[in-house]
Amino acid sequence: MSIEISNPAELHDPVGFGYSHVARVSGELVLIAGQYDSDAEGHTTTDDFAQQVENAFANLGKALHSVGLDYPDVAQLRTFIVDHDLARLEAIGAAIAELWGDKPPVQTLTGVAALALPGMLFEVDAVAVRS
């Protein structure tokens, strides 16, 4: 089994934070690290939760596209939410419905007290499969 680690140029360089964005395993299984609302330097850009969700999923798309995949190739999501409540769940549900329609990937949602950086309210990681 081989593992290919990559960091798309379209996303900030995460190595200084101690992780990489994408790991392709044996060419078929692709693991995407937690994506969040980040600018070119890895800093959050807004304190609006719904906008952070939208930006995090856009960054997930960039990571997927960097290895020739797209949202329908995602089998599993793990989402992490600071101060989880019903309104935030609805924002995530709307974003997922927009991207996956009536066939969303399996998902585990975890409410957390804080995420890695100040200002982060949402993070999503993914497991995708090359067909």
Image (cartoon, grey):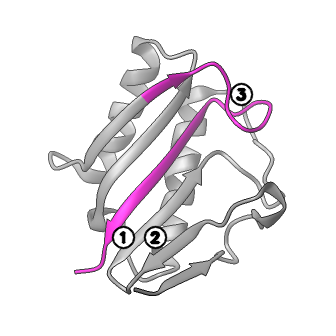
Residue that label 1 marks: 70
The foreground one among 85 and 6 is 6
Looking at the image, residue 27 sits to the left or right of residue 7; the answer is left
Q: Nearer the N terminus, badge 2 or badge 1?
A: 2
- Compute the Cα span from label 2 to label 1: 5 Å
Expressed as whole percent of the image width and height from the top left, the position of residue 17 reads: 79, 55
Looking at the rendering, the stretch of residues picked out in magenta corresponds to 110-131
Q: Quadrant of residue 40?
A: bottom right
Tally the numbered discs: 3
- Compute the Cα span from label 3 to label 1: 27 Å
**Residue 113 among those drawn in magenta:** yes
Q: Residue at x 66, y 66 (%)?
A: 20
The foreground one among 41 and 27 is 27
Name the residue furthest left: 102
Q: Are marks 2 and 1 in contact (CB under 8 Å)?
A: yes
Residue that label 3 marks: 47
On the rendered image, what quadrant is the C terminus found in?
A: bottom left
Q: Name the kind of residue labelled 2 in the image.
A: Leu
Does residue 1 sit above or below 78 in this rendering? below
Residue that label 2 marks: 64
Where disc 3 sits, the SS reads loop
Q: Nearer the N terminus, badge 2 or badge 3?
A: 3
Expressed as whole percent of the image width and height from the top left, the position of residue 90 reads: 37, 23
